[in-house]
Amino acid sequence: MSTTALTEAVGAAMTRIEGREKVTGRAQYSFEHDLEGAAYAWLVQATIAKGRVRGVDTEAALAVPGAVAVLWHDNAPRVASDDDLELAVLQRPEVGYRGQIVAVAVADSIEAAREAADAVRVDYDAEPHDVVLSAEHPKLYKPDHVNPTYETDTEKGD
């Protein structure tokens, strides 16, 4: 970063109420404030590429000192609409990809939440997944727009 750019950035930061504290490293961020009764979450991600969650064994997870709860599609609060699968976390048993969130361990510390998440056992009905990419694939489609309003195809790039 050039000296001019750095000076402009610092000047812009100084016009913010918390700018001086942030620039000098003295700002306190939300995680640095003590909060009575805070809860922490750690994600449990799918280990299969496609299928259904048949069940979740939470016994060992809930035995972890500090563990509060384990949420999964069977006990998670319902959202108003689960039409948008990107936002419908823990709403359905279907697994669409490896790494999908299938449960969340909640505890009184981040360390306990991570340990509890590691203790969660998920039982799956795995299904075959399709990873063949071809122009003739029966499920091939082209959205009208992506991310969120850019044209799908462009002339840029190689």
Image (tube, grey):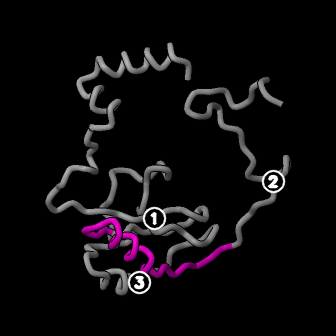
Report the residue marked by disc 1: 92
> Position of 77 compared to 137: left or right?
left
Question: Residue 106: horizontal and vertical position, in percent?
Answer: 31, 68
**Mark with earlier residue (3, 2):** 3
Q: Residue 133 shows which numbered tag?
A: 2
Is label 1 in a helix, a strand or a loop? loop
Question: Residue 118: horizontal and vertical position, in percent?
Answer: 45, 76
**Mark with earlier residue (1, 2):** 1
Q: Amino acid at mark 3?
A: Asp
Quarter location, residue 145? top right
* Label 2 CA crowd tier, 10 Å (few <14, some 14–19, many 20+): few
Q: Amino acid at mark 1?
A: Arg
Instruction: Specify the quadrant that holds the C terminus.
Output: top right
Depth check, front residue: 3 or 86? 3
Depth check, front residue: 139 or 124? 124
Quarter location, residue 23? top left
Depth check, front residue: 87 or 120? 120
Report the residue marked by disc 3: 57
* Label 1 CA crowd tier, 10 Å (few <14, some 14–19, many 20+): some
In this view, 74 is above or below 135? below
For discs 1 and 3, the disc positioned in front in the rendered view: 3
Q: Residue at x 42, y 81 (%)?
A: 119
Q: Amino acid at mark 2?
A: Leu
